[in-house]
Amino acid sequence: MSHIASGIKRRNSGFTLVELLLSVTIIGMMAGLSAPVYNEFMVRNDLDVTTQEATAALRRAQTYARAMNGDSAWSVEIQSSVVTLFKGTNFAGRNTNYDETVSLPSTITISGLTEVQFAKLTGAPNTAGNIVFTSNANDSRTITVNAKGMVQY
């Protein structure tokens, strides 16, 4: 006895080719539209994290200097690819065993102060000014070190 004769209809289950192509097209469009937003988010996140880490290094250097950690002044050297907290006032002649470094993403450029030294006991900086981090998307963050040693961003 055939299926038609018995009154039972056979149903095919699954997706048609049109439904499958439409789904793939919609997913592709959503991914294409979200990629630039994700990239912008990542660049801004790199900028924020870099600013926070550099600020923390400056504050830590000042704290170490005030506490006379190692009976020495402490400083921060800011270069294009790394921020280095080091013991002493001479970056070239420092003891690298005390270094604390933060790597900088290649999407960020730096301008302004390149080195800040904090005096032993007082924690006073040798210079006041700004450190500006700029992303390749032209967003920027500024860290300010004032004459009394206050570090803020």
Image (cartoon, rainbow, N blue to C red):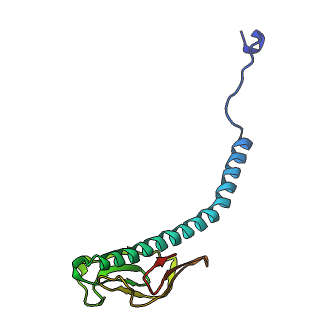
Nearer to the camera, 133 or 105: 133
- Above or below, 16 against 103 in this view is above
- Above or below, 28 against 20 in this view is below
Task: Tell me which residue sits at (41%, 72%) in the image.
Answer: 56
Task: Tell me which residue sits at (40%, 75%) in the image.
Answer: 59
Left or right for 19, reference 71 = right
Task: Tell me which residue sits at (36%, 78%) in the image.
Answer: 62
Nearer to the camera, 145 or 113: 145
Q: x and y percent of residue 87 in the render?
A: 27, 82
Give the position of the N terminus as an image quadrant: top right
Q: x and y percent of residue 74 in the render?
A: 31, 82
Nearer to the camera, 71 or 55: 71
Left or right for 57, reference 36 = left
Image quadrant in which you'd find residue 118: bottom left
Left or right for 148, reference 8 = left
Task: Tell me which residue sits at (42%, 80%) in the image.
Answer: 81
Image quadrant in which you'd find residue 14: top right
Q: x and y percent of residue 32 in the render?
A: 66, 60
